[in-house]
Amino acid sequence: MSIAIIENDMPQESKHIAAILLAAGAGTRFGGEKLLHPLEDGVAIAAHAARNILAVTSDVIAVVRWGDFPLYDMLEQEGCQVTMFQGAARGMGATLAHGVGQARGADGWVVALADMPRIAPSTIKAIVDALQQDAPIVAPVYKGERGHPVGFGAALRDELLKLDGDQGARAVLERHRDSVRLVECDDPGILFDVDRKSDIAR
């Protein structure tokens, strides 16, 4: 007796989605050492951001400024793969391109900011899930406002690798605005970043 195998019934192979944690800013408005500053529970801002992502994926590449060994060591201890970037002063776009370059083999990337410590892991998982379903760009929305992190599919690899300057991925988002899949979430953390010490109390 022969057994017919219907290909459509075979489970789809899951995509490899990496996370890139951008942690190379100078934090000048904060007064320096922002990402090492503890929140009310004593855990550093960047450590919170890393833990939220690591709760969803173990493949997290953190990009730090050249010579920032305290932050490098802390994020490595949290479980991130950490890379120092000499061109961090050129801005967030250059830093993001460097991070993508460290994870070229990925089928997509979740791009997160290390100064956003209150994003729920469930929100990050929703971004990863949408990338698994072939969404080219994914962003969370809370009460009508788009936030972070943002997911990018593999088709945008070359555009991300060409980024430079301080605009981050804004140019890519603008070029593909009609392809952005918005994910509604009940998570105000997608809008909360720490620029100044007063933001922590907020």
Image: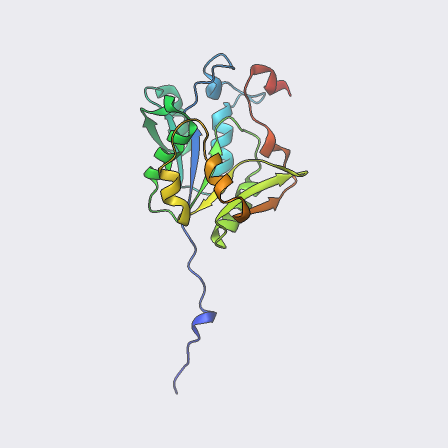
Give the total number of marks visible in the rendering.
0
The residue drawn where x is 33% and y is 25% is 87
What is the basis of the colouring in this image?
Answer: rainbow
Residue 130 vs residue 179, the one in the foreground: 179
Measured along the vertical axis of the image, is residue 134 above or below residue 116?
Answer: below
> Which residue is pictured at 50% across the width and 31% down the height?
49
Q: Quick one: quadrant of the N terminus? A: bottom left
Find residue 144 and report its horizontal and vertical position in percent: 66, 39
Coordinates of residue 111 in the picture (x, y in percent): 46, 37
The location of residue 188, given as percent across then percent down, is: 64, 33
Q: Is residue 56 left or right of residue 160?
A: right
User: What residue lies at 51% left-to-right and 29% top-to-bottom?
Assistant: 48
Work out whether residue 22 or residue 55 is closer to the camera in this orientation and state it: 22
Question: What residue is rendered at 36% in x and 43% in y?
Answer: 158
Q: Quadrant of residue 93?
A: top left
Q: In the orientation shown, which residue stands out farthest toward the front?
A: 175
Residue 138 location, x and y as percent?
A: 53, 45
Left or right, 44 with respect to 103, comes to right
| Up-down relation of residue 86 to residue 104 (above or below) | above
Q: Along the line of sight, which residue is nearer the eye, 167 or 34?
A: 167
Instruction: Residue at the far bottom: name it.
Output: 1
